[in-house]
Image: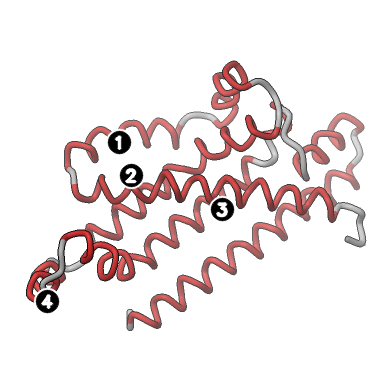
Amino acid sequence: GASGVWATTMYTMAATLASVAVCMVIGLPLGIMAAYSRTLDSILKPVLDTMQTMPSFVYLIPVLMFFGGGAVTAVIATVIYSLPPMIRMTALGLRQLPPEINEVSNAFGSTGFQALVKVKLPMASPSIMLGVNQAVVMALAMQVITPLVGGLGLGQEVFHAMNLANTGQGLVAGIGIVLLAIVLDRLTQAWTRNQREALGL
């Protein structure tokens, strides 16, 4: 606020949270299905490996071709870049649960869906939240690149600073992104820690 970038910082946070929300909507079901289906898991693995190793600039080309430039394009590119850890950590958290959970759930008459929603997902929530944490960090990292396809926020401030060789402006925008990343990272870590303590882990 003191540096005059409050509005752009809030835009960056909104774009990041929107991207992470979409990642959760897509990644959570895919991670659950991958945990239960070896076939789907074997299909997703090379796709996720490609998504994680592909240079982030490459994502911008097909997204720009299909959707043009703008805020929506920036969010879509961010979602593609941030999605893999959400899927991987959800699947990993469910796979690491002890097999006795199925026996206990069946003994109490739970259906498969009830066991998943009321037992397995809460117990796997620390791992799932770690995936959310990684998605947040990767989404913020992508915010510096999205101005190439019309994204706004602090990333655009960095690009303006580069064009003008303005070190001060670039430093202010960079520090804003760092502080935003630290705040969101600490919030997700605290939530994960509370979940672990509640589950006695």
Contact flag, marks 1 and 3 (Cβ < 8 Å) = no
Residue at 73% from the left image edge and 29% from the top image edge? 150
User: Residues under labels 1 and 3: Cα distance?
Assistant: 21 Å
User: Residues under labels 4 and 3: Cα distance?
Assistant: 37 Å
| Disc nearer the start of the sequence (4/3) | 4
Contact flag, marks 2 and 3 (Cβ < 8 Å) = no
Would you call the spot at circle 3 few (<14 residues within 10 Å), some (14-19), or many (20 or more)? Answer: many
The residue labelled by disc 1 is 44
Disc number for residue 136: 3
Apparent side of residue 139 relative to residue 42 in the rendered image (left or right): right
The residue labelled by disc 4 is 108
Apparent side of residue 49 relative to residue 139 in the rendered image (left or right): left
| Disc nearer the start of the sequence (1/3) | 1
Quarter assignment of residue 39: top left
Q: How is the image coloured?
A: secondary structure
Of badges 4 and 3, the one in the foreground is 4
Residue 30 x %, y %: 33, 44
Disc number for residue 30: 2
Residue 41 x %, y %: 24, 40
Circle 1: residue type: Leu
User: Residues under labels 1 and 2: Cα distance?
Assistant: 9 Å
Of badges 1 and 2, the one in the foreground is 2
User: Residues under labels 1 and 4: Cα distance?
Assistant: 33 Å
Quarter assignment of residue 77: top right
Would you call the spot at circle 4 few (<14 residues within 10 Å), some (14-19), or many (20 or more)? Answer: few
| Disc nearer the start of the sequence (2/3) | 2
Residue 155 x %, y %: 75, 40
Disc number for residue 151: none
Would you call the spot at circle 1 few (<14 residues within 10 Å), some (14-19), or many (20 or more)? Answer: some
